[in-house]
Image (cartoon, rainbow, N blue to C red):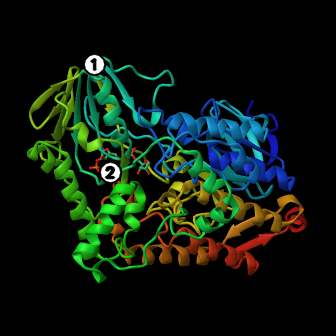
Amino acid sequence: AGNTEPERIEALVIGAGFAGLYLLHKLRGLGIPAMALEAGDGVGGTWYWNRYPGARCDVESMQYSFGFSEELQQAWNWSERFAAQPEILRYANHVADRLDLRRDISFKTRAVAAAWDAAAARWLVETDTGRRISARHLILATGCLSAARLPDIPGIADFAGRIYHTGQWPHEGVDFTGQRVAIIGTGSSAIQAIPVIAQQAAQLTVFQRTPNFSIPSRNGPMTEDYAESWKRDYPAKRAAARRMRTGILYNLSQTPAMSVSEAERRAEYERRWAAGGTAFMAAFSDLLTNREANDTAADFVREKIRGLVHDPEVAEILLPRNHPIGTKRICVDTAYYETFNLPHVKLVDVRNHPITRITPEGVEAGGAAHAVDCIVFATGFDAMTGTILAIDIRGRDGVAMREAWADGPRTHLGLMVAGFPNLFLITGPGSPSVLSNMIVSIEQHVDWVCDALAHLGRQGQGVMETTLKAQEDWVAHVNEVAHRTLYPQANSWYMGANIPGKPQLFMPYVGGVGTYRQICDDIAAQGYPGFAFTPAAQVRAA
Ligand code: NA7
């Protein structure tokens, strides 16, 4: 098969999550023949894989949805303030059907290698199903939190019961009734799953290494009034959201925390706590830049935790102290802390009593054996770079992406990598993506890439590449902006700190979605400084 001619396409998209779906739609609109490869057997990406109990978006449904089509946003009705995974997956399927995208998606097909052929000015992509595809443009819509990761704890393979990872949940679901369940990790996924698993399990043991800050979601059924308040005014509200720091429209305070009295601060935190959700972090303007300000918010949440958890010893273990609030993605929960009041739920502090191994019977931590029937790993992902580096990508002169990124990912705007022509990243490292409403970021990246392809002329039949200088300037800027904030103070997956040996640098751009959009728009308006374009005619002549 290796000798036969590869299939040919103009744009090859990897991934059929929200980014891949919108790309297919946009590229079609530009008249650029495109197709997508998708590892799963359905669309939805993150929402296809993360089917763990309690999985839910922490951005309100009215905002966590596509804004590019007024028809689409009017047609869809959400049932809850924060949509649960099955509903978001239905929405992704609805979009795929409505826009007739499925005919251009190859499911159960994973890209394993991609090499730039300079002579042909095309990418040659190989799949795990043995296909070879020659594409002028390669667009990675592979997701930031998709490379699920099991920790290096010895003995996992010897465990006699079943093991699960939240990010690779069985499609048929899991019945925990009567089971003794262990869950390892207390990130966003675990904090959503724990209260739901506790309702079923006979016994639930939570292994916590780092306590996290979590804000109640105050989730509930969508009311017609609330949905209408958005739908009446959707275009204007979407436009406003796109200019926000997080791509989410909410009440972002302009007031520094220490400029008001303690009583006023407390009142504001109380209001935000009662309203629920991530908008808590927008209570004051400087919570992510001023440690003293941040401490006031962190103290408030710690006090709430003490109030919610009946056993003071358990509460003490749950108090987050290892990072400023908000410097790891703030969690949003439904009855997380309250779950520790249930008699069959146990908390094990594995910071002070580390997990030493998994035995056939269960988990060993701090010399104690915890016998369980199944283990849930809520241990996160090789974030932002994992899915990209899982593909053996070779750019100009055969240079591997792995080498180019040996000291951490380097990109221009999170969109392109020097030495990798016609390769585009959607929500790549160096973009605000993971600090934002992902769908807002996805739409902006896709629009920008598609505009750039249009700028190349003749349906994108040329070569576009970022310069090393522009990339180095952007990397420096991303770092500088990050270090003006408290973010680097946390050992987070934003820093690559959750993966032993991963180079540590702050990956997302913290300058905000609105600022980033302006920078991208300015670059386009100025004729793309920092990018080299070779139009189609010259490519053919070369
Ligand atoms: P996260 O946020 O990366 O959380 C992973 C959790 O697993 C975290 O509490 C880790 O503790 C814990 N962990 C990882 N390895 C171990 C070992 N070896 N022992 C004990 N505990 C461990 O992943 P999530 O899936 O919850 O959330 C990812 C993102 O998805 C989230 O931020 C949202 O944006 C959506 P640690 O903190 O490293 O001590």
Q: Quadrant of the C terminus?
A: bottom right
Q: Amino acid at mark 1?
A: Gln
Q: Quadrant of the N terminus?
A: top right
What's the residue at 54%, 75% (across, down)? 474
What's the residue at 15%, 47% (across, down)? 315
> Which residue in the rendered view is the most extreme toward the front?
225
Say which element carries label 2: loop
Side of 505 where 120 appears, left or right: right
Q: Is residue 426 visible?
A: no
Say which element carries label 1: loop
> How packed is label 1: few (under 14 Cα within 10 Å), some, or many (20 or more)?
some
Q: Quadrant of residue 348?
A: top left
Q: Is mark 1 within 8 Å of ligand 1?
A: no
> From the viewer's perspective, is the residue at label 1 or at label 2 nearer?
1
Side of 138 where 474 appears, left or right: left
Q: Is residue 262 visible?
A: yes
Q: Which mark is residue 154?
A: none
Q: Nearer the viewer, residue 498 or 47?
A: 47
Residue underneath mark 2: 500
Give the mark nearer the N terminus: 1 vs 2.
Answer: 1
How far is mark 1 from mark 2, CA to CA?
A: 32 Å
Residue underneath mark 1: 179
Q: Is residue 125 above or below residue 29?
A: above
Q: Is residue 40 above or below residue 241?
A: above
Q: Is mark 2 within 8 Å of ligand 1?
A: no
Q: Nearer the viewer, residue 153 or 234?
A: 234
Q: Amino acid at mark 2?
A: Pro
Q: Nearer the viewer, residue 56 or 507?
A: 56
Q: Are marks 1 and 2 in contact (CB under 8 Å)?
A: no
> x and y percent of residue 327 in the render?
34, 63
> x and y percent of residue 225 in the render?
58, 50
